[in-house]
Image: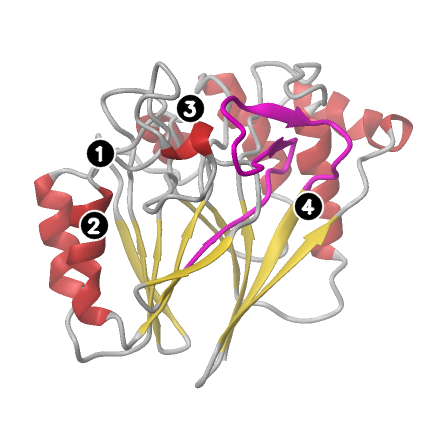
Amino acid sequence: MVRFLHISDSHIGPDPAFQTCGHNPLRELSELVRVINALPFPFDFVLHTGDVADESSEVSYKLAASVLANLKAPIHYVPGNHDCSVGMQRTLLASKEPLGRIDQFFAVGGVQFLLLDSRGAIQPGGELTQSQLEWLAAFCTADGPPLVIALHHPPITLDVPWLDSDTAMTVPMLLSNRGAFVDTIMPARSRLRGVFFGHVHRAFQVVESGILFSSAPSIVGQLKTWPELTEPVLAAEEAPGYCLVTIDEQRTIVQQYSFARAASARVASELQTCSTQ
């Protein structure tokens, strides 16, 4: 059995007082770390599916690192459209020779995990290169151990016009070559235990072509994703959240949780500490 926490879209800014979606991202991330560390059960790792930072500056990643270093579990990152993979590698992964794109493989408890850098040339949309699809195809064979794939951009439509349409917005939101992505992973369908993504600031669970696609809510703020909604609207009344994912021999179980927004008085000292690091 493998258990991990799926978090996404923390949008840490260049100073501790930075706000987006009407909230302070650093404060919310600090509260989430506190919540995660207090969970009364063991889990294997945390998966962050992108937009760690809001504008990808070095100081933003240093602020994020100062909070995430307090996690009592390993954490793995997928770059988002707001992220700079080189900055992430240097600051969060301590890489001395960062690559332009960062695709990763690791295994836990007999389950293979593939993390893809889906940042596209036209922001905020996503795209995978031909070499990435070929790398992915090498793992997506019919035979093998259970497999999990993670990326930032949704590789399927979600019944939300402002997300799904290539013309509803001036820029796309989805993975542009999502058809090629699905074709690439289909040979592994019988052992694929889920495709996990972020970007949409909302938890979705969709089964398409026999494959589970699942996103996590944002750490800082949710967006409304009603059918027929043609532009993004902030869901100001909704709490931040995360997902607990359990993979056993028979099932993939996704549980969504919310957590209360941090009280400013309680975390003020933590933010002050972050600002000096």
The foreground one among 77 and 67 is 77
Q: Which residue is mark 2?
A: 181
Separation (CA) of disc 3 from disc 2: 22 Å
In the image, taking residue 37 as reference, residue 64 lies left or right, namely left
Q: For marks 4 and 3, give the one nearer the viewer.
A: 3
Percent coordinates x, y for residue 208 in the rendering: 35, 60
According to the image, label 3 marks what residue? Answer: 82
Nearest to N terminus: mark 2 or mark 1: 1
- Upstream in sequence: badge 1 or badge 3: 3
Reading the chain from its start, which is encountered first: label 4 or label 3?
4
Q: Which mark is residue 99?
A: 1
Name the element at disc 1. Answer: loop
Amino acid type of disc 1?
Answer: Leu
Depth check, front residue: 258 or 266: 258
- Disc 3 marks a residue whose amino acid type is His
User: Disc 3 or disc 2, which is closer to the eye?
Assistant: 2
